[in-house]
Amino acid sequence: MTTEPNKPNQLSRGRLFWTLFSSTFTLSAFTIGGGYVIVPLMRKTFVDKLGWIEEKEMLDLIAIAQSAPGPIAVNTSILIGYKIASVTGALVTLLGTILPPLIMLTLLSYVYGAIKDSAMVKTLFYGMSIGVAIVILDAVVTMARTVLATKKILPPIIMILAFIATSVLHLNIVIIIVSCAAIGVISTLVLSKEEAAS
């Protein structure tokens, strides 16, 4: 159920860009723990709350963002912005995502020396790290459910093999991503040929 009844094409350009900017700015400003935390929150905002992107499309965007060079949060925000409002939307979401850390890091650079040894600050970041772990776990469970909901045999097998390759075999993530992409391309080509033959 979405809380925003309007689709992007039903909004004025100003309201559309403001929603894109304010959403990404707020997520970026109040998210501690990097891209793997902000990405599931982007999913909740643009899929669950606004209803502007389908669940499957969001998974595809995250997969592309993960495999592309650069920070996953920035990559995902650019792809979301582009999907919703083309190049201008991508620039708006990019600005909304990079401004908060830029401002905060600039301010923190002036006070870092005074707070780096503070017990309270260390405790604060320890507590935040627990919250980060929970958010990442929630994202993993949600995405796994989406993959399993396809009721196809190949996606769960790829998911399990990728997990084993990362956690047990400690393979380079680039090899895993390229291998998964290759399997996806091959399976799509095989299915296309089967459909064409039938």
Image (tube, rainbow, N blue to C red):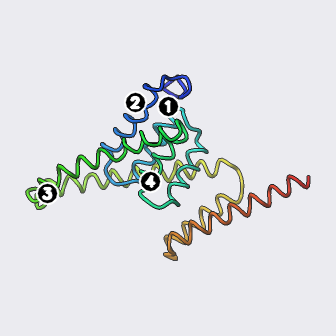
How many neighbours does mark 3 have within 10 angstroms: few (below 14), some (14-19), or many (20 or more)?
Answer: few
Closer mark to the observer between disc 4 and disc 1: 1
Residue assigned mark 2 = 18
Closer mark to the observer between disc 3 and disc 4: 3
Q: Position of residue 88 (x, y in %)?
A: 47, 38
Q: Are marks 2 and 3 in contact (CB under 8 Å)?
A: no
Residue assigned mark 1 = 50
Q: Nearer the viewer, residue 190 or 87?
A: 87
How many neighbours does mark 1 have within 10 angstroms: few (below 14), some (14-19), or many (20 or more)?
Answer: some
Residue assigned mark 3 = 112
Q: Amino acid at mark 4?
A: Leu
Q: Are marks 3 and 1 in contact (CB under 8 Å)?
A: no
Q: Earlier in the sequence, mark 4 or mark 1?
A: 1
Q: Position of residue 133 (x, y in %)?
A: 37, 55
Residue at horizontal 85 percent and vertical 52 percent from the top:
195
Q: Amino acid at mark 2?
A: Trp
Q: Earlier in the sequence, mark 4 or mark 2?
A: 2
Q: In the drawing, does residue 151 fall left or right of residue 85?
A: right
Q: Nearer the viewer, residue 80 or 35?
A: 80
Q: Are marks 4 and 2 in contact (CB under 8 Å)?
A: no
Q: Please tell me in which quadrant of the rendered image residue 189 appears.
A: bottom right
Q: Amino acid at mark 1?
A: Leu
Element assignment for label 2: helix
Residue assigned mark 4 = 137
- The residues bearing labels 4 and 2 have C-alpha atoms spaced at a distance of 30 Å
Q: Earlier in the sequence, mark 3 or mark 1?
A: 1
